[in-house]
Image (cartoon, rainbow, N blue to C red):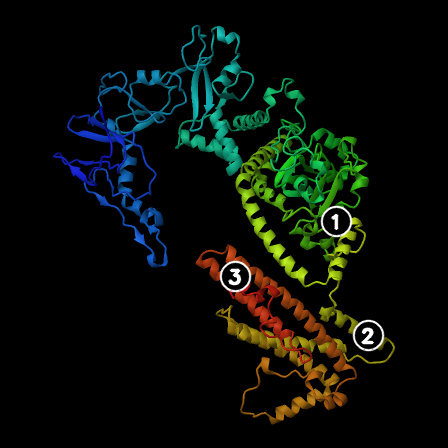
Amino acid sequence: MSWLNLSTIRQPNRSQSNNNGMFEYEVRPSEISHDLGFDMSQDGRRGVRTAVNVGLKKQKIQPSDWVSLPGDGQDVPDEEGVEVDAESGQKRPRFESSDDPMAPWMRLKQPFLDEMARRHGLADSMDQNACECCKGAFTRQSPRFCCADCGTVVHCCGCLLERHQCLPLHRIKEWNGSFWAPTTLNKQGLVYQLGHGGLPCKRPPPAICTMVVIGTEAIHTVSYRFCGCDRADRVNNLEQLMCAEWYPAMTVDPATCAMFSALDSYRMLNVVGNINVHNFVGSLERRTDPCLVEKIPDRYKAFGRMARQYSFLISLLRAGCAHNPNGLAHTNTGECAVLCWPCPHDGKNLPDGWRDVAPEFRSLYMLLVAMDANFRLKNQLRANEHDDLPLGPGWGYQVEPGPYKEHLKTYVAEKDVSTCITFTALLQKDMCMTTGAGDLQKGERYSNMDYIFLSALMGITAMYLAISYNITCQWKVNLPSRMKKMPERLRLDLLTITLLFALPVWHAATHEGACQTENSLTYQVGVGWTDGEGIERVWSVLNPISWATKEMGVGPHHDVIKDKLDHHNWEKNIGQGTTLPHKLIIAIDERDRQVAAFKDVDSMLRSEVRKQWQKRIDDWWADRTLPNPYQHKDDSRDGESEAAIHLMLTKDEVEEAATGGSKLQGSSVTSFLVAGLQLEAAQQRICTEARGRALLAGDQQERIQEMRIAFFSKLARFRKLQAVYMPAAVTKLQEEEDARDPDLPPPKAEDVKIYLPSGLRAAQREGGCRKGLPAMEGRLREGQCCDALKDLRGRLHTKKHLLLHRETQIAGQRAATRSYTLIEWVGERVDAAAGESASERYRELKPSDIQLDEEHDVNVQAYLGY
């Protein structure tokens, strides 16, 4: 090949055809410096020019002007860019290759298929009559070989073995005249020499051994020799295997090894994709022989042992234990765990004098801890289970099993042991803490949780510790007294550490209102927007392996979980560079919004009110036994509920009947009034269903008719009681029936007049209603109205949440339609609740009343889609 240095060469943007009908495509380096190389084709009939050493300039990427099709003989014009709405300022061109990448490929699927078919034949070696290496001529009976890992070059048997004396695990194919048939280097007579990387040994031993080696692509059977020269005096057989990066399955006369690369691949597939040993080995077996015609050595159990040992050794290397001059016996507790980089570690990432900072900066050095149990990560107890301890007991995330079990003997009776073991853990910043995980024998007992909690805090130097636990309201009560019963090495010095206890945000909803306020993370100083639910996000990572770890022994169970947590912690650490700036941007924006909102509220407060509020908060932080200023008192403006008023009226009737003051007529007066109110509510539901906007089901009319039938059935029973307690109402109903045109259809269920006492005139109520009935109805209606207002507020908040969810999370027509339908349905329920709260004693609710406070803001209305 000859070379010529050219600068600023512009070549035509077209393809040229030679006399032989072959197309030659020229390179067009636009206005750049490059070398131009000239070379001849193998047949000597074509000259090929190639631009090399191209010094590319930074420029706008443009689509190529043509795409070559092998053997097609025609140029394919490049797709033209389409300007989309250029007048509005959108200048970005659109191309088919980016909008629909499959469309260009669909036009080229035949060339792709042809090339894949060629690789099953001789392809470019069709006319090759000699070996590529030794140039020895091939006869009709000469075997031809190629290596799937080296390329498509065809060799004779001698050259093949010579080129692969250091590569015994390559996959070999032999041409049988019709296709490439799989074979192995072992069948062709290759013997791999250990101790020298495959190169010859000066004094090789006569014995040739056979080894099954699990590689990344297949399971190989390899013939090999150990080293017999002076090097063997310094390196034993196991070390020779390890030097070749073959990990032995046994320590005595191993017959199976696995390549380090295969173990690395399995570990990555396991921690990322939850691939287990059975599926990994099974895929290698099918890669070795897709038809499973030949017997492939079964190495499932052996590979499982090797993978477990290898992952453990990798964690030791990562922790630097290989450089410990005292050896592994002196490995410290939790030394092999991956620590959280942003969390405070004295002597590592804390500045000098951090203990003496001002109170407003103490949150920078606060440790946030989440604690929870996972009942999906169970591990079965077996009566005949052999003693298989973790490879590094207490070196990672699990507590050391020996002292842990000794501690539990004083708390857990034999009858309390269940048939499974549950897993629990402590986390900091969504990362598992060292010795912060352990097994639970029967639920979340304090003895287990206390021990694991205190073990995780060993060596922690933080002065402020915020603990999130879903039953922290109970767990924290006697923690100091229980701590005195713990081993001395686990006891915390509560004089130097300030503990803050809180409920996770999502779990707090299951607690009582007073408990939520007392232990809310929102009111804890220094925790920011922490939700305390980070441990649930870790469970989402561990839960997919629960079905496999459940059947494992205790040792493999702990080792598999540790390896998964190692990967999770590492991923969290390396992701801090992305997540922390993102959180900082959100925090700054939210801080500005909160400050502005606080200033708006603060400007409307009187000075004495502000001082009073601040004093209540300061006093409460100094003495937590005082009333909680953040706890909402019973809101008297809501009044009593209908159920509470119903209960009080019923008690009054029972007392009156017991003294002989009144006589019950089959049903209490209160039940009679409640039945009438329920009939009115049924009428309103029928009207709401009839004018519904969201749920236009095909059987809507049928459903309305069924509701009307149910209404009339209840009305008939109500009329019987009404004749007893309200004879004036029966008289009025009879008068209306006599005055009604008999040719007209009877009124519909939603148009029937119930005639409770409030529906009659005062004169009619005095003589035609039982004494006290109007007052009782008024109290029940007031309770009904209060319930409706509470329900209205709840549905308004639900609607707001759905609107925000639609604006921030919903994408796509299908999801948007479902979201719109759900919002419309909630909107109808809002209107229904507003109608239930209507009463003659209260002013009618206007549309502006049926909104949250935020919705009055014009900007918020635009954001919510109003």
- Placement of 321 over or under 795, stated as above or below: above
Residue furthest to the left in view is 19
Local packing at callout 1 (Cα closer than 10 Å; few below 14, some 14-19, many 20+) is some
> At which x and y percent is residue 396?
64, 31
Local packing at callout 3 (Cα closer than 10 Å; few below 14, some 14-19, many 20+) is few
The reply to whether residue 371 is in sight is no
> At which x and y percent is residue 16?
16, 38
Label 1: element kind: helix
Q: Which residue is mark 3?
A: 863
Tell which circle, 3 or 2, labels the residue nearer the N-terminal end.
2
Which mark, residue 473?
1
Q: What amino acid type should be assigned to the residue bearing mark 3?
A: Tyr
- Placement of 414 over or under 328, stated as above or below: below
Tell which circle, 2 or 1, labels the residue nearer the N-terminal end.
1
Q: Quadrant of the N terminus?
A: top left
Is residue 471 or residue 704 the one in the foreground?
471
Which mark, residue 652?
2
Name the residue located 53 percent from the left edge and 75 percent from the top edge: 690
Give the Cα separation between the discs numbered 1 and 3.
38 Å
Report which quarter residue 158 is drawn in. top left
The reply to whether residue 779 is in sight is yes
